Image (cartoon, grey):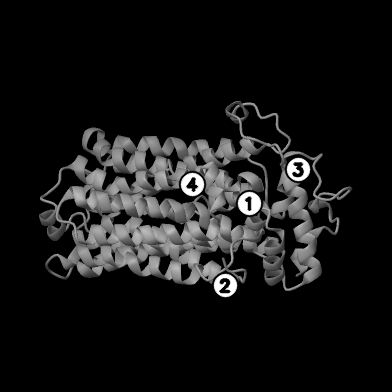
Amino acid sequence: MPTKIRPTLVLWGVRMGFMSYGWDAGVLGGVLQTSAFQSAMKTPDTTTTAMIVASFLLASWLGCVMAASPWSDRIGRKIWVCVGAFIQIIGTVISTSAYSTGQLIAGRVLIGVGNGFVVSTGPVYIAETTGTVKQRGPLVGILMGFACVGTACAYWIDFGFTYATGQVVWRLPVAMQIIWSILAIVLTFPNADSPRWYFLQGREDEGKLVLQQIYEDNSLANKVAAEIQTELKQEVGETLRFSDFFIDRSETKAATRIRDGVILVGVAYLMGINMIFYYMTTIFQVYIGLAPTTASVCSGAATTLLAIGAFVGSIFCEKSGRKKWLLWGSALQSVFMIAFVGLLSKAATSKACGSAAAAMLFGWILVFSPTWAPQPYIYISETMPLRHRHTGVGLGMSAQWLMAFLTVYAGPIGFENVGWKIWIWFAVFNVLGFPYVYFFLRESRGRSLEHMNELYNNNLAVASGAASPSEGSGSVTDIQEKA
C-alpha cells in the first residue's frame, strides 16, 4: 500500500464519489415520465416505479451497514472508496442495458451498495487527512455540495434529452454516472490511507510519515501523532454495548455519540429532501399542475439552488456553531413546509395556490441546502471516537438511506392514497429537528479530532495536564489553526 499522500487528490477523489451519489439520486427523477422509459419498462405501475427508484436507497443502506461492521475497519478508508466506485460502475452497466424492471432494479441495487461504501467512508477519509481544524468542517460539508451538483447536472442532462428521441433519452443519462466513478478511483487509489487509520492498525511509522506529508512540519506532525496515540489509549477497552445506546456509562460516551449521529441524520432525511428530489418533476407536473417543460425547468432550477446553498453552508459553517446552523434551519424550514402543505391542499382547485406552493418549496430548499444538507455530515464525521469512527459514520449514513427509502418508496403510494396529506409527515419532522438539536447535540466546532473525547468527558485530556482547546492552551488544535 502506498505511503505517499496528496491531500488534494484525496479531496477530489471523494468529491467525485459524491458527484456519483448525487447523479444516481437525481437521474431517474427526470426520465420516469418519458415515453422511452415507460416503453422500455413496459409502463410500470406506481408500486413498481417506487421500487425502481427506492432500491438504490435500500441498497445504499446495506452498503453503509457493511462499511460500519467491526471487521470493515481492517480494510482502510481508501479501499472502501475505490471498491464502492468499482461496484457502482458494474451496476451502471447493468442498469443502462436494462429492458425489464427486474434487471434495472438489480443494477440499482449494485449501484446503491457501492454508493454506501463511498458515502460512509469518504467523509471519514477527508476528516482524518485535513490539516487544520478550520478547514475540516468546510471540506467535509462541501461533499454534500458536490452531491447536489451531481443531482443538478443529472436533472439538466435529463431536461436536455427530453428533446431527443428513442432509448437514448434515458439510457445515456444513466450511463454517464460511470464518469464520476472512474474519476473517484483514478484520483483516490494512488494515495496512502488516513494517518489515523494507520495508527489504529498499529502501523505508527506509516502514520507518522503520512502526517509529515500533510503538515509539512515534523514537529507539528509528531505532536499530532502523540495526541492520536493518547486518544487510542483513552479508548482501550471501550466496547460498544447495546445498553449503552440508552444509558451510556463509558468514559468516552462512544454509544451516545453514535446514537446522536444516527438520530440527527435520520431526522434530516425525514424532513422530505429525498421525496422532493426523487419526484421533483412529478410533483411540479402532476400535483402542482405545471406544464411538462416548465416542470423540468423548475426541477433543474431547484437542484441547482440546492447545490449552491450546500456550498455556501459548508464554506461558512465555521462562522457559527454547528448547532446554530441546524436550529435556524429547522425553524425556517418548518415555516416553509407548513405553508407548502396548506397551499398544496388547495392546488387542485386554484392555480394561484399551486404557484404559491411551488414558491414555498423553493423557499424550503433555500433554507435546507446550507443547513440540514451539509451540517449532519460534518457533525458525525468529527464527533465519533477514533476506534469507532467507521462504525459511527457508517451507521449515521445508514440512517440517511433507511429514512430515504421509507419516504421515497412510501411517498408516491401515499400520494395515490391520501394526496397532499402525506406532506404533514414531513412537516412534523421539520419541527421536531429544533428541540432535538437544542437539547441533545453538543457543539463540536473548533476542536481537533483528538479533542472530541473531552467534549463528552471533561476528565479526559489529550495530554497530561492540558487544558481544553477552547481555553487557549496552546494545544495542537491552536497550532493547527496557525499552520
Mark 3 vs 4, N-terminal side: 3
**Quadrant in which the N terminus appears:** bottom right
User: Which three-letter amino acid code belongs to the residue tagged 3?
Assistant: Gln
Tell me: 210 left or right of 356: right
The dot on residue 234 is: 3
Where residue 2 appears, as percent x and y from the top left, is 58, 69
**Secondary structure beneath label 1:** helix
Mark 4 vs 1, N-terminal side: 1
Where residue 260 appears, as percent x and y from the top left, is 58, 38
User: Which three-letter amino acid code belongs to the residue tagged 2?
Assistant: Thr
Mark 2 vs 3, N-terminal side: 2
Q: Which residue is mark 2?
A: 8
Q: How many marks?
A: 4
The residue carrying pointer 1 sits among few (fewer than 14), some (14 to 19) or many (20 or more) residues within 10 Å by Cα, namely: many
Q: Which residue is mark 1?
A: 382
Q: Which residue is mark 4?
A: 397
